[in-house]
Amino acid sequence: MIGWWIAVLVLVIGAIGASMIAARTEKYWLATVSLVPIGIALILGSTENPLPSDTPGLVILLSAALVALATIAGSPLVALVLSLASYPAPRGEHGGILVIDADSPLPEREILRGGTTIGYLERFAFIASFMVWQPGAIAIIVAIKGLGRFSELENAAARERFIIGTLVSLVWAGLCTAALLVGR
């Protein structure tokens, strides 16, 4: 069964590349190929075909690749789901979205800046919390994110994007974490 796990590793590396291209070209659908190696890993691990324990090099490489995939592929996947779930919001100069508030003296203001970087950190912290057997840390991660964004969530568009983006990001990180842990 080691051949299947090597194939998963190769597919994960390819999916990382596709996700990087998806993020740079804004062709977010390319990141959906990331679902393939995750699905295969989940099937292999759940059908009594775990990673062979006598191949620590493969375990380390696959673990690192899955952490990278969880972190990198999450952004274009979140962008894809957001584009399907809501009207596209105009992008701001600093990566946030532009909103119009009747209460604001400015015609438009940019909110939710830095979402990509926050998403990378959130997914990495999610998977790391499971790797050190501290899944309760996920509640802390979500709380910190919510408190940090609280002042920007008075706008309905911002709330919607925040909730959808966070849920997609955490579900993706959870799938990658499951693929990482089920094979052991």
Image (cartoon, grey):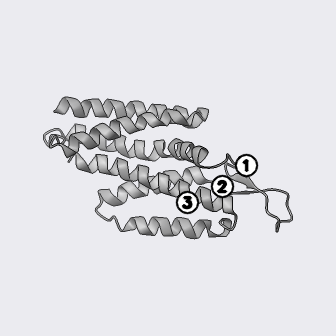
Which image quarter: residue 105?
bottom right
Disc 2 residue crowd, few under 14, some 14–19, many 20+, Cα 10 Å: some
Residue type at numbered disc 1: Gly
Residue marked by disc 2: 113
Between the C-alphas of marks 2 and 1, the distance is 8 Å
Q: Residues within 10 Å of mark 3 (few under 14, many from 20)?
A: few
Q: Where residue 20 appears, x then y in whole percent?
A: 51, 35
Q: Earlier in the sequence, mark 3 or mark 2?
A: 2
The mark lying in front, picked from 3 and 1, is: 3
Which residue is at the front of the view, 1 or 40?
40
Q: Is residue 158 left or right of residue 36?
A: right
Q: Estimate the x, y position of residue 1 in percent, counting from the top left.
A: 16, 33
- The residue that disc 3 covers is 163
Check contact, mark 2 vs mark 1: CB within 8 A: yes
Query: Would residue 113 appear left or right of 123 to someone viewing this image?
Result: right
Q: CA distance from mark 3 to mark 1?
A: 19 Å
* SS class, disc 1: loop
CA gap between label 3 and label 2 equals: 15 Å
Label 3 residue SS: helix
Q: Residue at x 61, y 65 (%)?
A: 149
Is the residue 72 above or below the residue 163 in the image?
above
Q: Which residue corresponds to mark 1? A: 92
Which class describes the residues within 10 Å of circle 1: few (<14), some (14-19), or many (20+)? some
Between disc 3 and disc 1, whose residue precedes?
Answer: 1
Q: Is residue 61 visible?
A: no
Instruction: Count the marks.
Output: 3
Is residue 117 left or right of 69 when viewed as pictured? right
- Name the residue nearer the viewer: 21 or 160: 160
Q: Can you tell which quarter of the image residue 79 is in?
A: top right
Q: Amino acid at mark 2?
A: Arg
Residue 13 visible in the shown view: yes
